[in-house]
Amino acid sequence: MPKSKYLISIVGPTGIGKTKLAIEIAKVFETEIISSDSRQFYKELNIGTAVPSTIELEAVKHHFIQHISVKETYNVGDFERDAIEILNKLFKTNDVVVMVGGSGLYEKAITQGLDKFPEVETKIKSNLEHELDKYGLEKLQLELKAKDPNYYAQADIQNTQRVIRALSVIRSSGQAFSNYLSKDKNKREFNSILIGLTASREIIYNRINLRVDQMVENGLLVEAKSVYKYKEQNSLNTVGYKELFEYFEGKIDFDEAVRLIKRNTRRFAKRQLTWYRKDDRVEWFDYQYDKAKILSYIEDKIQGEYKSP
């Protein structure tokens, strides 16, 4: 018998319009939204993480939006545990739930589950931190790219903690870090339907550049200053904040910080697309989509499940 519960996951590069589509679909199915955007988990971050507006949050109930502090430690395993618990509750009264976000790791944690990571010796992590201090992040990024191109393609490689974590597992186990992120170990009691939004590279990059300019205009600098005292936290080791922290420390000027935010965000979007285009579960639609066509695709997928033997 086919599963009768469906998680519709909206994926795609940053700034492409995923939130708008997720809300439209959630309204049709009279359901709620799970956010799988790891940057939007933090209470103190709003502008630089493009948290949905008050109007959007009031239109449909969202989960995992600004629910923890940047001072807290929260990883993909924590999210998997918490999100599955919420989904189990939602599926008691809803046949469909919507999930949206550009964090590929977090999406896969819910739709496919994560394998258990091997234990890593403290010495291996210490060696990596020493190499970071001595040679810089780029050397570690190149090692990650050579040893695990799949993870490199979708990870936030500007996040030193994530790079070190991945390399520590690789050096310890001798296996690619991504091997532990793609095994269907935890069977799900629901079907997943993945909808991807995309556009030409030029359009994506232009949208990102305009979005960053809007963030700056909306007060990103003030927001970054308000959390600067927590800059050592892993949650702030991310695009939009790292660059401004360097500006505060006098390492670069403000214009250069903004240029780097745009560049690093574009690079992140490129890795997001590389990651998802390898995933044959995703059905792609243009960012200027026809909502009726997407809904028709979803209905066909659901009906196909019911008709399957």
Image (cartoon, rainbow, N blue to C red):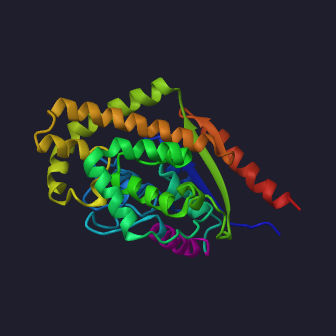
Range covered by the magenta-colored residues: 78-92
Residue at 37 percent of width and 43 percent of height:
139
Left or right of 38 on screen, residue 221: left
Left or right of 282 on screen, residue 218: left
Looking at the rendering, which quadrant does residue 54 occupy?
A: bottom left
**Residue 282 appears at what percent x and percent y?**
65, 45
**Residue 291 appears at what percent x and percent y?**
60, 40
Identify the main secondary structure in magenta.
helix
In this rendering, the count of numbered labels is 0
**Residue 171 appears at what percent x and percent y?**
48, 58
- Position of the N terminus by quadrant: bottom right
Looking at the rendering, which quadrant does residue 288 occupy?
A: top right
Left or right of 24 on screen, residue 240: left
Looking at the rendering, which quadrant does residue 69 occupy?
A: bottom left
Residue sticking out furthest to the right: 309
**Front in this rendered view, residue 8 or 264:** 264
**Front in this rendered view, residue 229 or 89:** 229
**Residue 165 appears at what percent x and percent y?**
42, 59
Left or right of 265 on screen, residue 46: left
Residue 20 showing in the rendered view? no
Q: Is residue 4 above or below residue 214?
A: below
Residue at 61 percent of width and 46 percent of height:
195
Residue at 53 percent of width and 57 percent of height:
177
Q: Is residue 160 above or below residue 74?
A: above
Residue 244 showing in the rendered view? yes
Q: Inspect the magenta stretch and tell me whether residue 81 lies in it.
A: yes
- Position of the C terminus by quadrant: bottom right
Q: Is residue 163 above or below residue 34?
A: above
Q: Inspect the magenta stretch and tell me whether residue 203 lies in it.
A: no
